[in-house]
Image: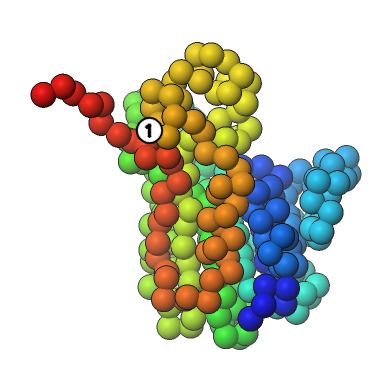
Amino acid sequence: MPDENRTALVTNAAGYAGPPAVTALSSSGFRVVVHDKAFDDTVARAAFLQTHPGAEVILADNPATLVAQTWKLAGRLDTIVCNDHYPAVQASSETVCLDEFRRTLEYLVIYPFALLQAAIPLLRSQGGGNIVLVTSCRTHAPIAGGSVPDAARAAANALVRSLAIELAPDAISVNAVSPNFLYSEAYYPKAVFIDDAKGRDYVLKSVPAGRLGRPEEIGDVIRFLASTDARFLTGALIDFNGGWPSSPIRPI
C-alpha cells in the first residue's frame, strides 16, 4: 500500500524521538496525527506545527480517547509510534521515592500499554498494522542508582516481545527502537553533551561512534518499521546506540 494512503499516530510527539519520527513519516507521505500533553498550551502547539506543518494535533486526556479520536478523524490507523519518555530517576534503592517509581512506570509502561489495548481491536478489524515503541537499551550496562528507569525500560522491552507473539497471527507487527546516546533535550541535552567540552569527552570515550545519535537517524529507523509490509519482522528490539556499550581495548 502506498504510504500516502496510511495514517500514523505519534505519541509524546514534542520530545525524545517524536519530532524526527513525525518528520520522517510526513516526508514519506503518511498522514501523521500527533499527541503531546505539551500541546494543551497553544503556544507550544503552534511552535510544533510551525516546524511540522503537515501534522494534525489531537488533544485527548486518556489513551482510549486518543485512539478513538484518531480513528474517527482518519478512518484507519496503520501505524502507532509510542514515543515514551520520562526524566530518569537517579537514586539509590534505599532512598528512591516510590511515587517517582510509580510515575515512571505510568509514563513508560502503563500508558503505552493502555494505548495499544485500545488500538488492537481496530488494527485487527482493518487487517493489521505496525506498532513501534521507542524504548531504551540502557539496561545493557546498568549503573548504580538507575534501578527505577532500568526496571521501567526493561518492562517496556518485555512488552514488545510478548505483544509480538500475541499479535503476529493478526498481521500486527510490534517492534522497538531502543536508543542510548541519542541527542534529545529529554536525556542528552545539547548544552551538556554537545556544547560542553566535558560532556563531549564523555560521549567520545563512551560511544564507539564518537558522537551522539542524530535525530534524523532514528527517524529513518522508525520510518522503516512504521512503513514495512514485512510483518514477519516482529518482536525486534533494535539497538540505536553507536556501538555502546563496548569494552575498553587492552594491549596484549
In the rendered image of this protein, does residue 185 appear above or below residue 132? above
For image coordinates 45% across by 46% down, the residue present is 240
Residue 53 in sight from this viewpoint: yes
Foreground residue among 59 and 15: 15
Q: Helix, strand, or loop for circle 1?
A: loop
Relative horizontal placement of residue 167, taking residue 54 as reference (left or right)? left
The residue wearing badge 1 is 208
* Three-letter code for the amino acid on which mark 1 is drawn: Pro
On the image, the x and y values in percent for residue 126 come to: 62, 85
Relative horizontal placement of residue 88, taking residue 10 as reference (left or right)? left
On the image, the x and y values in percent for residue 199 come to: 51, 19
Bin the neighbour count of mark 1 within 10 Å (Cα to Cα): few under 14, some 14-19, many 20 and up: some
For image coordinates 43% across by 61% down, the residue present is 160
For image coordinates 57% across by 65% down, the residue present is 226
For image coordinates 35% across by 29% down, the residue present is 143
User: In the current view of this chain or complex, which residue is farthest to the front?
Assistant: 252
Q: How is the image coloured?
A: rainbow
On the image, the x and y values in percent for residue 18 come to: 65, 49
In the rendered image of this protein, does residue 43 appear above or below residue 132? above
Foreground residue among 179 and 157: 179
In the rendered image of this protein, does residue 196 appear above or below residue 155? above
In the rendered image, which quarter contains the C terminus?
Answer: top left
Residue 96 in sight from this viewpoint: no
- Give the quadrant of residue 91: top left
